[in-house]
Image (spheres, rainbow, N blue to C red):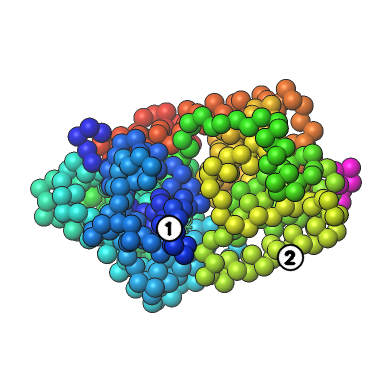
Amino acid sequence: MQDHKLIVISNREPYIHQRRGEQIEVIRPASGLVTALEPILRQFGGLWIAHASGSADFETANERGEIQVPPSHPTYTLRRVALSREEELGYYYGFANEGLWPLCHLAHTRPIFRLSDWEHYQAVNQRFAWALPPESSGKNSLILIQDYHFALLPRFLKRRFNGATQRPRIGLFWHIPWPNPETFGICPWNQELLHGMLGSDVIGFHTQYHCNNFLETCNRYLEARIDWEKFSVTMDQHETLIRAFPIGIDPSPVRTLNQQEIHQLKARYGIQAEIVAVGVDRLDYTKGLVERVEAIERLLEKYPHYRGRLSLVQMGSPSRTHIPAYRALSDQLHQAVERVNTRFGSESYQPIVFLPEHHEWGEIQYFYQMGDLCLVTSLHDGMNLVAKEYVWCQAAERGALILSKFTGASRELTEALIINPYSIEELADSIATAIELPVAERTRRMLAMKEKIQSQNAFHWATHQIRALLTGTTTPSTLAQAS
Ligand code: F6P
């Protein structure tokens, strides 16, 4: 990396400056992408370009929209790009999150494609292509584009740097699942999106399955050469490698709470139950949150001896609240929680302790430690880093992970209790199994998962991608482990 400059482009910024009256607050967003990428930038330095989403973002930045971060000990530059309200509505809420998000997640929410959203999406992608400083045009720049907000950006960047004698290497990482060709064909602009993405030198997904879907999609909709041996697509005489890079977390040690501190944390939130299940999610319809609450209800119905003894503590970070499907989910969830709490709760006991607000990592890690088990019930998820964070933070002899088979994480964390979140019965039973797991068994499972999380961490994820970008190859272990 010494000879290269790392440039990351994502919609979500790693630090949001928000004005609250006289004060300016720094917020770390709930984003798996930020969780994984931030340690890389902290370690290697570089430039991160992202949408300015905080009300005090420009007050705290210089005239180029730049600020050195992390605020406590700066090591890299964050460059903020301003979007108008219309652009945000069309590009972010509209095309990215009402169109591509439900298109790529099989969660039975119908994607909406509006021409005006598509026009904003194109314009914002174009804008980010010009947000890169001119000096990033050289071969020493490594540009890592993040996610479905920027499918067109690789092609735009390639065009922008066309005149350069040796252009930078461009990688695109798609953090969400890639659907099968039929599903992707629903999008009226499917060819334009694929063409845009193929401006990259390497495209990464979390699992080999998503790589296969992507190749099949290109095969179906493009006049391109598909190399099934090399796993590449060649179009307009440019070859793009398609690779699986399963994302990980920063495996830095966390401070372990003692028993007394755990009791104090429980007391602070009025949690009386002796057994705590935790859930930590953005309030998103892909996360299987209503199913989770229904499973707690079924558990208490079917196994009455857990009444009064088990609570689910559900942290829910509000997300994309401008979109009707998200507001509907929030209403549905609140109603489900109320129903279960009314049915099985008492003055001193709530089966579901619902905390629908943003929480910072400093607090989340302690909630994980409070959790005798953790519920990850996504209906569909690219990876799901909550599963990895929980295993990493919780003591081996205390933890148990219940993990949806529709997450990328379930391919790696095979020692979890793997469930189908659409089966409320199975989910309820697996919670009972997790509670009753003998200590030796839960320790064995947790230790095996901790080992994987330690080795397949965020740094490996980034290193493998960077190596693929620089050399055009991936190590056999990356491929084997991802398949
Ligand atoms: O991991 C997928 C993703 O959409 C990221 O791109 C994003 O930062 C995160 O989920 C949270 O979503 P948002 O940035 O829309 O709040």
Lower position in the chain sequence, tag 1 or tag 2: 1
Q: Nearer the viewer, residue 68 or 454?
A: 68
Q: Position of residue 244 (x, y in %)?
A: 42, 41
Residue 394, percent from left and from top: 62, 33
**Amino acid on which the number 1 mark rests in the picture:** Ile
The correct choice, above or below, for 230 with respect to 291 in the image is above
In this rendering, position of residue 33 left or right of residue 7 = right
Q: Amino acid at mark 2?
A: Gln
Secondary structure character of the magenta stretch overall = helix
Query: Which mark, by number, is residue 24?
Result: 1
Residue 335 badge: 2
Q: Is residue 213 visible?
A: no
Whether residue 374 appears in magenta in the rendering, the answer is: no
Of all residues, the one furthest to the front in this rendering is 22
Picture residue at 36% right of the left edge, 60% below the top: 57
Q: Residue at x 75, y 53 (%)?
A: 352
In this view, the residue in front, 307 or 292, is 307
Task: Name the spot of residue 349 as percent of width and height, x first.
Answer: 82, 50
Q: Quadrant of residue 412?
A: top right
Left or right, residue 387 beside residue 97: right
Residue stretch in magenta: 301-307
Query: Quick check: can you spot residue 66?
Result: yes
Please say if 185 is above or below 271.
below
Q: Residue at x 69, y 55 (%)?
A: 354
Is 147 situated above or below 445?
A: below
Q: Quadrant of the N terminus?
A: top left
